[in-house]
Image (cartoon, grey):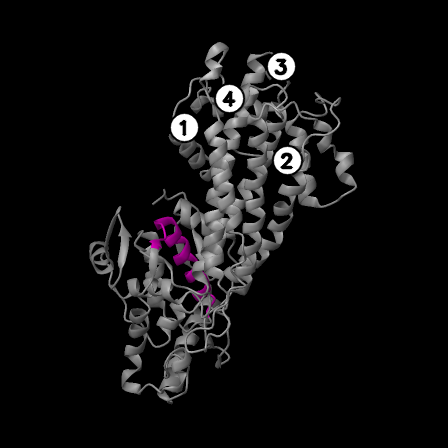
Amino acid sequence: MNSENCKKILFGEGNLTIEDIVNVSKSQDPVALSQAEDFKERIDAGVRFLDKILKEEGHIYGVTTGYGDSVMFEVPLDLVEELPMHLTRFHGCGLGDFFTPEQSRAILATRLASLSRGYSGVSWNLLDLLVELLNRNILPVIPEEGSVGASGDLTPLSYVAGTLIGERDTYYKGEIVQASEAFEKEGLKPIKLRPKEGLAVMNGTAVMTALACTAYKRAEYATKLMARITALSSLALKGNSNHFDDILFSVKPHPGQNQIAKWIQTDLNHNTHPRNSHRLQDRYSIRCAPHVIGVLADSLPWLRTMIENELNSANDNPIIDGIGEHILHGGHFYGGHIAMAMDSMKNCVANLADLADRQIATLVDIKMNHGLPPNLTGATGDRRHINHGFKAIQIGCSAWTAEALKLTMPASVFSRSTECHNQDKVSMGTIAARDCLRILQLTEQVLAATLLASVQGIRLRIINNELSKDSLTDDVAAMVDDVSSFFELLEEDRPTDKLLRKTISYIQEERWNLYEAS
């Protein structure tokens, strides 16, 4: 856990942001429930109202009935209290890899965000234990596969509900231990889920929305990094900086696209050192880079709106309006907006991989790289004939890019009627989010390789007195120096897998502060 100086993220008071979820997830910022009176009243009223309805033998889906298509079956009142436990258990069938502890934290925080809207009928015991899980880093081990994104993320969220009752595996202090064991070590007790609480935890969009929050931040950083890589590639290729001129972009006023062009123009020091204006046009992967990156840049604001609206929603069923005493049966668990956001984002992100792949292909090819050595080898003399520089890395980029592009098929169009045709139209939002994260990983791999290649190209130009380091902006020079601090010039062939992995980790850690003043 971070120091006491960390920002405490409040749940139940105002709207949360993507950054709040990412900070809880990555930085392990502590969380707390609001102490506002209206929040307390919403929680208390929901519990009171459910108790009142049960006492009057009310008819409530998932409380006095079976689940899904089994809604036709009335549950005897003496079995109502057992029903939530059965829901957590029969959904314990998730498969595939497990979400990381960081992703598990994001999922817990996102579910807490929905439940703390005060329309789910959950008790303070449940909310308080979710807070304790986050603050004490007791994290459900959640399989990635098994959700169709409606009726919410039932199967993966069953691992959250199962943890609350002490029955599932958890990440705890670097090990995987039973929830009951972690609770005992921390002096906590499992809860007994009240009627509706199993459904409240499981029947929502928390998994896909949590993944969308983490995907958003990675895509946002990739946007900036690809702009910087384009500038570095242009410098290495002796590109024409006029392609990014502000007057040129004023006639096509997409704001994100124009911001990208401005960043690249500034990085190229265009106003002080305009470059290679004698070559009228560079290849599209340089000249049209703002138009490619700009699609993602211009999509980020509406993607944020869709993700944060879902984050700040009550998205289970039924909705419990305790104050107004309404039970509202609906379909807020449906993840269509997240599915659309993730399918759109993954398309834009994969285009960054494709763009970077074309740039590194240009950098290594003596037919296109304007005098750089074959495959960007730093070897000289006869040794050039046995050294192959970035050749295999560029092949790797082609493989990673192809896989990323393959995954851009929209998941949201692959709805499958399921659960006895009760869930006859589903969102596939969780699959879309997982696809997006995989595409981001592949894209970050291509960006890492192209970053290294462009820095190699710049260093070779400087060594050969074809580029003056003094002509570089402070930010670009600092980044070239920083990359050079862990990347020894590639002269003699050597394995580069560890270097690539290190560079990818630096990207994911956002090592470089890019365009912070903009």
Image quarter for residue 267? top right
Which residue is disc 4 drawn over? 481
Q: Characterize the local packing of mark 3: few (<14), some (14-19) or many (20 or more) Cα atoms within 10 angstroms.
A: some
Image quarter for residue 356? top right
Closer to the camera, 457 or 315?
457
Instruction: Give the extent of the magenta segment.
Output: 97-118
Which residue is disc 2 drawn over? 285
Which residue is disc 3 drawn over? 466
User: Secondary structure beneath disc 1?
Assistant: loop
Residue at figure coordinates x 28%, y 52% from the top left:
171
CA distance separating discs 1 and 4: 19 Å
Is 351 above or below relative to 375? below
- Depth check, mark 3 against mark 4: the one in front is 3
Which residue is disc 1 drawn over? 496
Q: Characterize the local packing of mark 2: few (<14), some (14-19) or many (20 or more) Cα atoms within 10 angstroms.
A: many
Earlier in the chain: of badge 2 and badge 4, it is 2
Q: Are marks 2 and 1 in contact (CB under 8 Å)?
A: no
Going by the numbered disc 4, the residue's amino acid type is Asp
x then y, percent, for residue 137: 31, 51
Q: Characterize the local packing of mark 1: few (<14), some (14-19) or many (20 or more) Cα atoms within 10 angstroms.
A: some
Going by the numbered disc 2, the residue's amino acid type is Ser
